[in-house]
Amino acid sequence: MSGSGTGSKVDRVLAEQREYIAKREKGYRERALKLYPWICGRCTREFNHKNLRELTVHHRDHNHDNNPSDGSNWELLCVYCHDEEHTKFENQVQYGNRAEKDIQPATFNPFADLKAKMEKGSK
Ligand SMILES: [Zn+2]
Ligand SMILES: [Zn+2]
């Protein structure tokens, strides 16, 4: 550690991180392609060397750092189904998570306070 904070050092760290992510991605993609048949897990479209670029590795638990060697967290999806899968997941997080609602007290109302503030302000 030299302690001199230069911009180029940050650039280098960022470049290394990008490289690491790219390598990691390439690593699990190759492993997943060896492990599973080249078929989209949703629309069952088949792939070959020509269009393999469109077959992607999806992480079932949406954690890209969770890459068990038996491939249990991976699913091969075409780019379209992969996109849909993530949209679905994001919607679940935003709207559909019942457990999250249960955690909050039943009396919690984010607008109650706002209403009170507005009434005060109008006078
Ligand atoms: Zn598909
Ligand atoms: Zn995914």
Image (cartoon, rainbow, N blue to C red):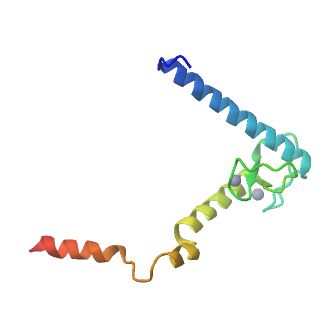
Above or below 97: residue 19: above
Q: Residue extending furthest bottom?
A: 106
Q: Is residue 73 left or right of residue 89?
A: right
Q: In this picture, is 39 found above or below 3?
A: below
- Residue 73 visible in image: yes
Quadrant in which residue 119 is drawn? bottom left
Q: Residue furthest left?
A: 123
Q: Position of residue 10 (x, y in %)?
A: 53, 24
Q: Is residue 15 left or right of residue 40?
A: left
Which residue does the image show at 15% across and 74% down from the upper left? 120
Task: Please say if 2 is above or below 33.
Answer: above
Q: Nearer the viewer, residue 85 or 114?
A: 114
Q: Position of residue 4 (x, y in %)?
A: 48, 17
Q: Nearer the viewer, residue 9 or 84?
A: 9
Asked whether 93 or 51 is in front, the reply is: 93
Quarter occupied by the N terminus: top right
Q: How many marks?
A: 0
The residue sitting at 39% across, 83% down in the picture is 107
> Which quarter is ligand 1 in?
bottom right
| Residue 92 coordinates in the image, percent (x, y) | 59, 68
State whether residue 51 appears in this view: no
Quadrant assignment for the C terminus:
bottom left
Q: Residue at x 39, y 78 (%)?
A: 108
Q: Position of residue 105 (x, y in %)?
A: 45, 79
